[in-house]
Amino acid sequence: MSDALQTMINNMPEKTGKPLEEWKKILKGKAFTKHSEGVNFLKKEHGVTHGFANTIITLSKEDTNADEDLISTQYKGKENLFPIYEKLLPIVKSFGNDVTVTPKKGSVSIIRKRQFVLIKPATKTRIDLGLKLPEKSTTDRLGDSGPFGTMCTHRVQLTSVDDVDNELIGWMQEAYNLAD
């Protein structure tokens, strides 16, 4: 942990009225779909300054139990898709030490300096894998972004662990390289 971050945590009770652990308890029942929603909640509802709100939200997301709960909720009723997710995760993590896995309410963002892969259990039988490949043409398999809009440039529909093949891994690696 950096000295600056530790100083913020140490100053939190005086500057915000509560220590970090109390803020985490307040946020535990909240399910923000975006980081900015959590920051705005703390600023508007609790009068926390932007810097502290950002730090509190970031550190509250580091609770791995919360991440596991978000993921298990995504795959509730879609358990047959979970092995696909389990196969994808170590692959994207192997690309580099700078890969961050950020579970959200309905998807998991894979981030380097910016998001390069998005994993979303879209239906009971399909995961939509979003990729950021701005210069890449679409194909039958590497489709347009569909419901992802501008979050991704392409989407690959996965229905089986076998869909995680060398071609897909190559696209994910390419997206990782572009996210530098």
Image (cartoon, grey):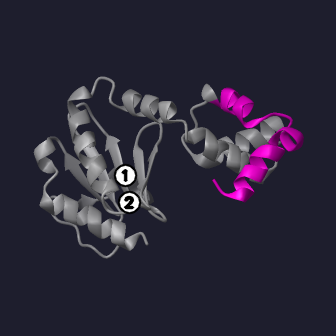
* Mark closer to the observer (1, 2): 1
Label 2 CA crowd tier, 10 Å (few <14, some 14–19, many 20+): many
Image location of residue 17, percent across then percent down: 86, 35
x, y (%) of residue 168? 19, 59
**In the image shown, does 151 or 65 lie closer to the viewer?**
65
Corner quadrant of residue 106: top left
Residue 61 shown left or right of residue 114 in the figure: right
Tag 2: residue type?
Cys
- Foreground residue, 30 or 111? 111
Q: Residue 2's spot in the image, x, y percent?
A: 66, 57
Kind of residue at disc 1: Leu
Q: Is residue 142 left or right of residue 151?
A: left
Q: Residue furthest left?
A: 162
N-terminal of the two: label 1 or label 2? 1
Residue 173 higher or lower than 9, as above or below: below
Q: Nearer the viewer, residue 147 or 77?
A: 77
Instruction: Note whether residue 82 is visible.
Output: yes
Count of numbered marks: 2
| Residue at x-position 21% and y-position 48% | 157
Report which residue position mark 2 lands on.
Answer: 152
Mark 2 lies on a secondary structure that is: loop
Main secondary structure type of the part rendered in magenta:
helix
Q: Secondary structure at mark 1?
A: strand
Which residue is under mark 1? 118
Q: Is residue 2 above or below residue 105?
A: below
**How far from the left and from the top, in percent, is residue 30?**
61, 30
- The Cα–Cα distance between marks 1 and 2, rounded to whole angstroms, is 8 Å
Taking the magenta stretch, the answer to whether it contains residue 112 is: no
Start-end of magenta stretch = 1-27
Point 26% across, 40% down: residue:
86
